[in-house]
């Protein structure tokens, strides 16, 4: 990979590591330390996610207007300030809620810029820059969650200060290295996509993105059940928390170490990004069918392994297609849409799954999720029907700039 991509990968890993110090412990801290009921804790996390969605959309637009460097600096100023103030005021529930929203908004500003920069600095890379960012995110999640748990076992204060220190390290990295990436982005019109009623092609691309992302939303609704309804279900049937945590360790390890095998499979047998999504979604469906029969830990382990293989196909493909769809000067806005849809799925998923489980039980939830995953296949088939001159084949995309 080019040096610029390595800089972005390291930055993404540091950024997500810092964020992951806190997110697995938010509910525990609010319920056990601040004395809030789980319903209120869940509502606070929804506010945090909502702030992230707003940040995604604004961050994407700012990338197109002022560039990735300035937008990431702005996001880091908000997150770093919020993190250190939270470290001092975390015993106040009002401050906790306010600053958690600040963290969500600031992080939301940065992520679409990181993805848009990855596509801009290595256009001939096709899916590879987005896959690299996806792997970096998962390395950050695994590392941050592990370190955060270790720090929390000593003192919760250390978690908040550690969160701030990681954002500070990322701030320094951005100041010294990201400015050189600024000139790589595409310059283009700053006219809002919604105002381009006379530009038919731009509207078609935007509509295509929305269709594709509607299926992406369903994938995330299904995926988030692992952190919500499935986690509770495993406890109810007597699977220890340590074994449930092991599932996520295996998930992160597979994402990092199985990349050569996934790459070999894609290069050898999959000739388009659309086919990559089809394969990944079908694997998702298999995982939930396995879950519908799971009663012992090995079955949940098998389902997690299958699910992880599926996500390695689907998650990098969506931002890659969004980058290809984006008109000149709109790469940030399109990545903002993709990231906000993913965040929206993470917000909707726990409520949707909890409601179905309360009404019908876990098995029905898994069958319904399997049926719902037909929708992403349909949206992938039809999203580009009205586009002219687009071919999302792997070879064409990866040779696009050569």
Image (spheres, rainbow, N blue to C red):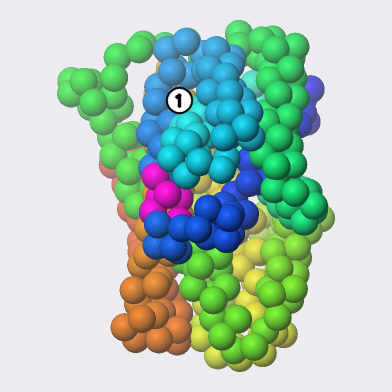
User: 372 or 224, which is in the foreground?
Assistant: 224
Which quadrant of the figure contains the C terminus? top right
Q: Is residue 75 left or right of residue 259?
A: left
Q: Is residue 390 left or right of residue 156?
A: left
Dot 1 crowding, Cα within 10 Å, few <14, some 14–19, many 20+: many
> Can residue 128 be seen at all in this image of the molecule?
no
Residue 309 forms part of the magenta stretch: no
Quarter where residue 376 is shown: bottom left
User: 220 or 145, which is in the foreground?
Assistant: 145
Rendering coords of residue 179 (x, y %): 66, 10
> Which residue appears at 74% of the width and 17% of the height?
172
Q: Is residue 78 left or right of residue 401?
A: left
Instruction: Look at the image and give the residue range highlighted in magenta.
Output: 41-47
Decide: is 354 above or below 269: below
Residue tagged 1: 59
Outermost residue, left side: 197
Rendering coords of residue 17 (x, y %): 71, 41
User: 174 or 328, which is in the foreground?
Assistant: 174
> Can residue 90 be seen at all in this image of the molecule?
yes
> Which residue appears at 55% of the width and 47% of the height?
317
Does dot 1 land on a helix, a strand or a loop?
helix
Magenta span main SS: helix
Rendering coords of residue 301 (x, y %): 70, 77
User: 288 or 321, which is in the foreground?
Assistant: 288
Decide: is 333 above or below 370: above
Rendering coords of residue 322 (x, y %): 46, 37
Q: Is residue 81 left or right of residue 152?
A: left
> Which residue appears at 49% of the width and 73% of the height?
229
Decide: is 205 above or below 23: above
Which quadrant of the figure contains the N terminus? top right
> Which residue appears at 53% of the width and 53% of the height?
34
């Amino acid at each position: 990979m080019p040096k610029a991509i390595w800089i972005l990968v390291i930055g993404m890993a540091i950024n997500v590591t810092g964020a992951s110090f806190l997110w697995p412990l938010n509910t525990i801290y609010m319920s056990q330390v601040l004395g809030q009921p789980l319903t209120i804790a869940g509502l606070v996390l929804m506010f945090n996610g909502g702030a992230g969605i707003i940040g995604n959309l604004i961050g994407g637009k700012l990338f197109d207007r002022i560039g990735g460097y300035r937008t990431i600096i702005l996001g880091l100023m908000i997150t770093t300030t919020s993190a250190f103030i939270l470290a001092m005021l975390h015993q106040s529930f009002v401050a906790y809620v306010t600053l958690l929203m600040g963290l969500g908004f600031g992080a939301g500003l940065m992520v679409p810029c990181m993805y848009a920069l990855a596509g801009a600095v290595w256009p001939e890379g096709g899916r590879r820059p987005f896959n690299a960012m996806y792997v970096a995110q998962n390395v950050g999640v695994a590392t941050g969650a592990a370190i955060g748990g270790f720090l929390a076992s000593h003192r919760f204060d250390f978690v908040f200060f550690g969160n701030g220190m990681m954002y500070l390290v990322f701030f320094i990295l951005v100041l010294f290295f990201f400015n050189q990436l600024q000139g790589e982005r595409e310059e283009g019109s700053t006219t809002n996509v919604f105002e381009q009623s006379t530009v038919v092609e731009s509207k078609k691309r935007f509509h295509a993105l929305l269709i594709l992302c509607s299926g992406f939303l369903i994938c995330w609704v299904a995926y988030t059940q692992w952190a919500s309804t499935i986690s509770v279900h495993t406890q109810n049937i007597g699977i220890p928390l340590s074994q449930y945590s092991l599932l996520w360790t295996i998930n992160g390890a597979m994402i990092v170490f199985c990349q050569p095998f996934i790459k070999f499979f894609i290069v050898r047998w999959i000739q388009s990004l659309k086919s990559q999504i089809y394969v990944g979604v079908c694997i998702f469906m298999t995982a939930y069918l396995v879950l519908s029969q799971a009663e012992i830990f090995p079955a949940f382990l098998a389902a997690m392994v299958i699910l992880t293989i599926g996500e390695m196909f689907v998650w990098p493909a969506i931002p890659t297609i969004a980058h290809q769809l984006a008109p000149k000067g709109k790469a940030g806005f399109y990545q903002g849409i993709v990231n906000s849809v993913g965040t929206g799925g993470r917000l909707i998923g726990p409520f949707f799954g909890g409601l179905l489980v309360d009404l019908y039980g876990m098995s029905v939830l898994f069958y319904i999720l399997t049926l719902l995953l037909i929708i992403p296949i349909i949206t992938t088939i039809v999203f580009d029907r009205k586009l002219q001159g687009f071919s999302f084949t792997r070879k064409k995309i990866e040779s696009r700039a050569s």
